[in-house]
């Protein structure tokens, strides 16, 4: 009797796997887009946040408030660094760094110009 049990067990296991494979729906492991979708959404939100904060920096700079410009530009820089990388994002990050540097030196007009360029680059994506 034992000589028949091994082939039957193997056949039963194969049949079971075949039944499970055909019964389960074909779908991604992580649902509709899954983890990658979440990363893309997060990067897009970071870019939008960076753009919003860079615009705030420009508004502060136009009012002559270099310290407020620096605060907004630093927050924009942090958000921009979380966003997906591209040539425009890299240029925007560079402009934000320049805006921060000039804002800390009290040059609100030059810092504002750099913040405006950052807005231009962040908007181009």
Image: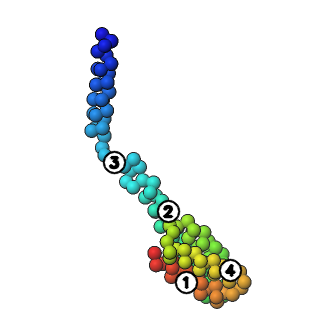
Question: Do tag 2 and tag 1 residues touch (Cβ < 8 Å)?
Answer: no
Q: Nearer the viewer, residue 57 or 36?
A: 36
What label does residue 101 carry, if any? 4
Query: Sequence-wise, which precedes: disc 2 or disc 4?
Result: 2
Quadrant housing residue 13:
top left
Question: Do tag 2 and tag 4 residues touch (Cβ < 8 Å)?
Answer: no
What label does residue 106 carry, if any? none
Badge 3 crowding class, 10 Å Cα cut-off, few under 14, some 14 to 19, many 20 or more, is few
Measured in 3D between alpha carbons, the distance from the residue under mark 2 to the one under mark 1, in whole angstroms, is: 24 Å
Quadrant housing residue 8:
top left
From the viewer's perspective, tell me whether residue 86 is left or right of residue 10.
right
Residue 53 shows up from this direction: no
Query: Sequence-wise, which precedes: disc 3 or disc 4?
Result: 3
**Which residue is disc 2 drawn over?**
42
Query: Sequence-wise, which precedes: disc 1 or disc 4?
Result: 4
Measured in 3D between alpha carbons, the distance from the residue under mark 3 to the one under mark 1, in whole angstroms, is: 44 Å
**Which residue is disc 1 drawn over?**
117
At mark 4, the secondary structure is helix
In the rendered image of this protein, does residue 40 appear above or below residue 23?
Answer: below
Residue 117 position within the rendered picture, expressed as x and y whole percent measured from the top left: 55, 83
Badge 4 crowding class, 10 Å Cα cut-off, few under 14, some 14 to 19, many 20 or more, is some
Query: Sequence-wise, which precedes: disc 2 or disc 3?
Result: 3
């Amino acid at each position: 009797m034992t000589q028949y049990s091994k082939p039957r067990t193997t056949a039963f296991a194969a049949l079971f796997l075949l039944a499970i494979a055909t019964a389960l729906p074909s779908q991604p492991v992580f649902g509709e887009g899954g983890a990658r979708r979440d990363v893309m959404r997060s990067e897009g939100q970071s870019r939008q946040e960076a753009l919003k904060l860079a615009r705030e920096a420009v508004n502060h700079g136009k009012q002559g408030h270099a310290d407020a410009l620096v605060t907004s530009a630093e927050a924009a820089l942090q958000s921009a660094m979380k966003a997906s990388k591209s040539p425009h994002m890299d240029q925007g990050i560079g402009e934000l760094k320049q805006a921060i540097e000039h804002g800390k030196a009290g040059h609100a007009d030059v810092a504002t110009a750099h913040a405006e360029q950052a807005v231009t680059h962040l908007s181009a994506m």
